[in-house]
Image: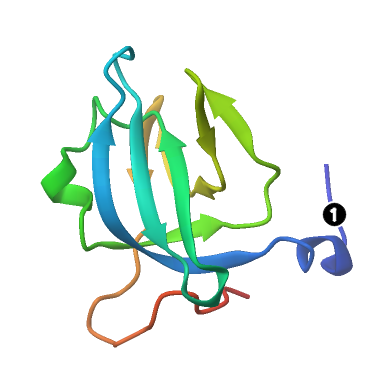
Amino acid sequence: MEINYETFLKLDLRVGLVKSCNKIPISKNLYTLIVDCGEKGLRQIVTGIANYYSPPELINKKIIVLTNLKSRKFMGVESQGMLLAADLNNEPFLLKIDERKPIPPGTKIR
């Protein structure tokens, strides 16, 4: 399905800085991340990448976050956004920000 540019502009994609990462105890593969999204504030994001990334691999990393996705609960925990990852053979590969430049959390992705 194709979308037009105006529809694309409705997506609020931002640079997010992962501040913390905790395993959801009753789940095999879910983490709760607290992500600094700049002016959008701290966001709690539930993600199913625990089988692929450890907390030290995520904490203090800059990622790309969809901030205007409707909140939803996973295992009783509210998720306030979605991180972006490539999918290769059902394995996620996080889309990260080039660390050579000081891009602050909350920077809009266009």
Residue wearing tag 1? 3
Kindly tell me whether residue 11 is visible in this rendering: yes
The answer to which image quadrant residue 95 occupies is bottom left
Residue appearing at x 56%, y 69% in the figure: 40
Residue appearing at x 24%, y 25% in the figure: 51
Q: Which amino acid lies under the numbered mark 1 shown in the image of this protein?
A: Ile
- As rendered, which of 71 and 11 lies closer to the eye? 71
Relative side of 80 to 34, left or right: right
Label 1 neighbour load within 10 Å: few <14, some 14-19, many 20+: few
Query: Could you say where residue 106 lies in the image, as x and y percent from the top left?
Result: 49, 75
Residue appearing at x 79%, y 63% in the figure: 10
Q: Residue furthest left?
A: 56
Q: Residue furthest bottom?
A: 102
Quarter of the picture holding the N terminus: top right
Query: Could you say where residue 66 lies in the image, as x and y percent from the top left?
Result: 58, 55
Please say which color scheme the image uses. Answer: rainbow
The answer to which image quadrant residue 12 occupies is bottom right
Query: Could you say where residue 76 lies in the image, as x and y percent from the top left?
Result: 50, 21
- As rendered, which of 15 and 36 lies closer to the eye? 36
Residue appearing at x 38%, y 82% in the figure: 104
Q: Looking at the image, is 86 positioned above or below residue 25?
A: below
Relative side of 57 to 96, left or right: left
Quarter of the picture holding the C terminus: bottom right
Q: Looking at the image, is 78 positioned above or below residue 28?
A: below
Query: Judging from the image, what secondary structure is the residue with disc 1 in?
Result: loop
Kindly tell me whether residue 94 is visible in this rendering: no
